[in-house]
């Protein structure tokens, strides 16, 4: 008979004997593959959908907003080196009075050509028709806002346009590549109920905002190979006399930045989580194959004595590994594809495309199979090589027993205080340190992975507390259409229910240190109030000195700035002042890039005496409805940000998405916990079955024999828990580094509840594994023990 056929028969017998352990390893491997397929398929779908959308609807590459520029500037922009296409527009914020809401909403009106489609940032018409330029106030409404309020063609929304209240007549529902996700200016989160985008014909926009023959927003695409920075510099040079706030490329455009950060985080998830899971699976395979080789020493020697060469023997054990890996891979691909579809469905509700392509790239299964094979081969190679290299004469002899001697407790004179069972447990643990370390490490990894899968929710809850309780203590913030005098602040203070009012002045700037720069808004704060507080990492307020600037930690990291350094502040509006300002402090923030100065310092920078951009407001909760009604009818108000609404939006968007990911992570972590603990218990039973059966023959009761093995498992679990907590903190720290973006950061916050839950899951896994092993102890073949091993 063919030697390979004989070994294949043995392969199936071995799988039948260790099927439960093989299944546990396959499930751990499946978890890693599923995480990889889920993250990569969602990432591929998001990337392809965005790329196709941008290409088909001509998403611009460089953007610039001005106060007012004549249409004659368009031709000069078109002749800038590197510019391919130019699209000038009128863009304005309006206050909306949505009938089904007490609080005011904000709309963004964007002009579209009267008789043709936009050459850039084209609009996809989901329902209805295009606005008629000859009919007043006809608009297209963004799908997200329309869905949130149940609006459709034929409905209308009252809006305040340039101080006059008019009904916007919705004739169509639309999407735009510029607003894949819609975020109100100054906010970090989408709020579909309180912010919507509308498109109106250019002729109507010119009449409504006194912009005949002018524009206040321009976007361009570039020729292939053009230098982006040169185009930005050229735009700034041309548009500076017309009140430009500084041009920027699509990398800094809100919607693009948001989706790019999401893709970065998916890429991190596709790398870190599968690596951990597959490393654990490889570790388990190494332990199991090493145990099989140890138990089959005599069989290996016999096969070599009968003429089997080392290669078929090694191939046999690799086939065993491959079968386990392939089972795990197939299950992982199927599970990952299912979870990837669910995840992309969730993304389709957040990011709005005309067509969201959900597909499984054929390369992903091939990559998954390759990864699982490589991980399995690396995990088992050491044990397989030991089987191949084992000389027949040495293999015929049983393994040398471990060296016996007094254990550490015995040398310390503590043996009399320990029962006999505990002495036996400690002797076995101490005399097999490598195996004990491997078992402890495996259980510790299960604790660590559980912590890694759960801690993100702790971090999100802390962010909400830090941002919306400790730092922002106002009920709402009011932004004005134009810079106003302090009298407006007094007027806001006299509105119904308003208590404390803290004015602020926001200014667009470009901060630079060396060759590093970022265009950010600098907010001037009044030191006489504490509705909006700057906090350090210890949650303590940070004062702003009269001659300094305070940077958020992420902005400081990008600029490579520290307290005491000097940065150059270039104002992008008004007098275009350029000043060098010392960095007085670095504060902690978990969203966006921000800088702060004293209110009077910003006014001095701008050459103003008393300008304000808006105010933070503390109001009586019982009178908020009355206050909202008044603000809806206030023409000078450009935007209103309500803290409770922002908090609700945070919970509904970020927190809800993280809960879904947390559910997947916990499910996989539980699989690892049971897989690791159960394998460890079964391996210990296999290694000690002869000794335990001998004790049964000598007259020990089953519960006494079980206590030895289960006691060892308990000791390993106790040793593994603190190690697992430390590893969990380390893995979580690595994970948040990969999730760190300009839009959002996640703090390393791990609650006691998370640690207790993780430990509890592992303890339950240990108890269940111990129960299964105890049943198998009762099934030990006592007759086989009486046979002397030659």
Image (cartoon, rainbow, N blue to C red):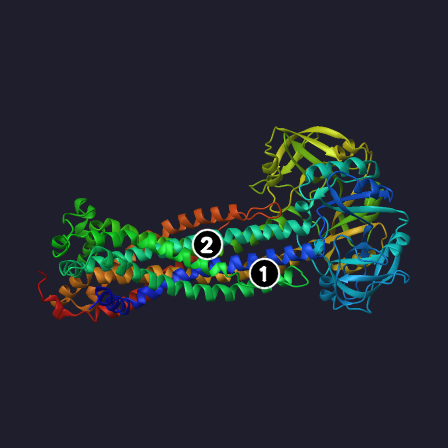
Quadrant containing the N terminus is bottom left
Mark identifier at residue 741: none
User: What residue is shown at x 46% (from left), y 67% (from top)?
Assistant: 334
Label 1 neighbour load within 10 Å: few <14, some 14-19, many 20+:
some
Residue 540 in the image: x percent, y percent? 59, 40
Q: Which residue is mark 1?
A: 656
Q: Report the Cα–Cα distance between label 2 and label 1.
A: 20 Å
Residue 157 in the image: x percent, y percent? 82, 63
SS class, disc 1: helix
User: What residue is shown at x 22% (from left), y 49% (from top)?
Assistant: 430
Quadrant containing the C terminus is bottom left
Q: Is residue 507 above or below residue 291?
A: above
Foreground of the two, 784 or 755:
784
Q: Which residue is mark 2?
A: 273
Quarter of the view holding residue 607:
top right
Residue 716 in the image: x percent, y percent? 29, 55
Label 2 neighbour load within 10 Å: few <14, some 14-19, many 20+:
many
Eye-nearest disc, 2 or 1 = 2
Q: Is residue 600 left or right of residue 534?
A: right
Q: Is residue 59 above or below residue 326?
A: above
Label 2–label 1 contact, CB within 8 A: no
Q: Is residue 432 left or right of residue 219?
A: left
Quarter of the view holding residue 633:
bottom right
SS class, disc 2: helix
Q: Earlier in the sequence, mark 2 or mark 1?
A: 2
Residue 133 can be seen, yes or no = yes
Residue 148 in the image: x percent, y percent? 71, 65
Residue 644 can be seen, yes or no = no
Q: Is residue 404 left or right of residue 319?
A: left
Foreground of the two, 95 or 628:
95
């Amino acid at each position: 008979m063919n030697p390979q056929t004989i070994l294949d028969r043995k392969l199936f017998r071995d799988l039948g004997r260790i099927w439960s352990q093989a299944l546990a390893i396959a499930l751990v491997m499946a978890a890693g593959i599923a995480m990889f397929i889920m993250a990569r398929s969602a990432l591929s779908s998001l990337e392809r959908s965005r790329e196709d959308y941008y290409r088909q609807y001509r998403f611009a590459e460089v953007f610039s907003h001005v106060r007012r520029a004549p249409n004659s500037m368009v031709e000069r922009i078109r002749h800038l080196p590197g510019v391919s296409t130019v699209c000038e527009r009128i863009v304005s914020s309006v206050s909306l009075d949505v009938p089904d809401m007490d609080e005011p909403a904000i709309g963004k009106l964007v002009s579209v050509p009267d008789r043709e489609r936009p050459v850039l940032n084209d609009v996809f018409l989901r329902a209805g028709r295009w606005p008629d330029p000859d009919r007043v106030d006809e608009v297209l409404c963004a799908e997200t806002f329309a869905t949130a309020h149940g609006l459709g063609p034929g409905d209308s929304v009252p809006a305040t346009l340039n101080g006059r209240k008019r009904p916007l007549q919705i004739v169509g529902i639309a999407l735009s590549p510029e607003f894949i996700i819609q975020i109100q200016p100054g906010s970090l989160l989408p709020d579909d109920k309180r912010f919507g985008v509308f498109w109106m014909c250019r002729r109507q926009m010119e009449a409504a905002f006194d912009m005949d023959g002018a524009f206040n927003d321009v976007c361009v695409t570039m020729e292939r190979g053009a230098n982006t920075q040169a185009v930005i510099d050229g735009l700034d040079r041309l548009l500076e006399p017309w009140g430009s706030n500084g041009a920027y490329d699509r990398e800094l455009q809100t919607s693009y930045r948001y989706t790019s950060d999401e893709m970065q985080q998916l890429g991190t998830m596709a790398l870190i989580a599968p690596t951990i899971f597959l490393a654990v699976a490889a570790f388990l395979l190494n332990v199991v194959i090493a145990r099989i080789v140890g138990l089959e020493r005599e069989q290996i020697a016999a096969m070599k004595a009968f003429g089997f060469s080392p290669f078929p023997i090694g191939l046999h054990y690799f086939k065993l590994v491959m079968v386990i890996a392939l089972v795990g891979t197939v299950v992982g691909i199927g599970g990952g594809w299912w979870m990837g579809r669910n995840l992309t469905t969730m993304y389709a509700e957040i990011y709005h495309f005309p067509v969201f392509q959900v597909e499984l790239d054929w390369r992903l299964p091939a990559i998954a199979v390759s990864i699982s094979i490589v991980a399995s081969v690396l995990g088992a190679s050491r044990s397989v090589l030991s089987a191949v290299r084992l000389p027949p004469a040495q293999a015929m002899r049983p393994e040398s027993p471990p060296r016996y001697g007094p254990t550490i407790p015995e040398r310390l004179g503590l043996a009399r205080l320990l029962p006999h069972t505990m002495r036996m447990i400690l002797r076995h643990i101490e005399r097999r340190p490598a195996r004990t370390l491997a078992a402890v490490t495996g259980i510790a990894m299960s604790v660590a992975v559980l912590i890694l899968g759960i801690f993100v929710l702790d971090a999100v809850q802390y962010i909400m507390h830090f941002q919306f309780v400790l730092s922002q203590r106002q009920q709402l913030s009011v932004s004005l259409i134009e810079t106003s005098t302090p009298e407006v602040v007094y007027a806001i203070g006299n509105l119904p229910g308003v208590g404390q009012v803290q004015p602020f002045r926001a200014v667009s700037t470009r901060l630079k240190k060396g060759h590093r720069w970022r265009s950010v808004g600098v907010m001037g704060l009044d030191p006489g109030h504490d509705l909006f507080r700057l906090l350090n990492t210890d949650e303590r307020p940070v004062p702003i000195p009269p001659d300094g600037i305070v940077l958020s930690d992420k902005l400081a990291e990008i600029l490579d700035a520290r307290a005491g350094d000097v940065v150059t502040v270039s104002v992008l509006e008004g007098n275009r002042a350029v000043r060098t300002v010392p960095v007085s402090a670095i504060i902690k923030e978990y969203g966006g890039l921000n800088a702060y100065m004293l209110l009077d310092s910003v006014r001095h920078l701008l050459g103003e005496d008393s300008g304000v951009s808006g105010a933070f407001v503390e109001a009586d909760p019982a009178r908020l409805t009355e206050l909202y009604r008044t603000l809806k009818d206030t023409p000078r108000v450009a935007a209103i940000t309500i803290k409770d609404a922002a908090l609700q939006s945070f919970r509904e968007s970020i927190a809800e998405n993280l809960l879904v990911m947390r559910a997947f992570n916990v499910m996989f972590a539980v699989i690892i916990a049971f897989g690791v603990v159960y394998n460890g218990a079964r391996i210990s039973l296999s290694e000690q079955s002869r000794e335990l059966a001998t004790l049964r023959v000598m007259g020990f009761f089953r519960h006494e024999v079980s206590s030895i093995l289960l006691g060892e498992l308990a000791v390993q679990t106790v040793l593994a828990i603190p190690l697992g907590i430390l590893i969990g903190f380390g893995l979580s720290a690595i994970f948040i580094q990969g999730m760190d973006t300009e839009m959002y950061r996640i703090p390393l916050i791990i609650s006691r509840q998370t640690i207790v839950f993780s430990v509890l899951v592992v303890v339950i896994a240990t108890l269940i594994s111990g129960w299964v092993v105890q049943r198998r102890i009762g099934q030990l073949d006592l007759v086989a023990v009486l046979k002397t091993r030659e």
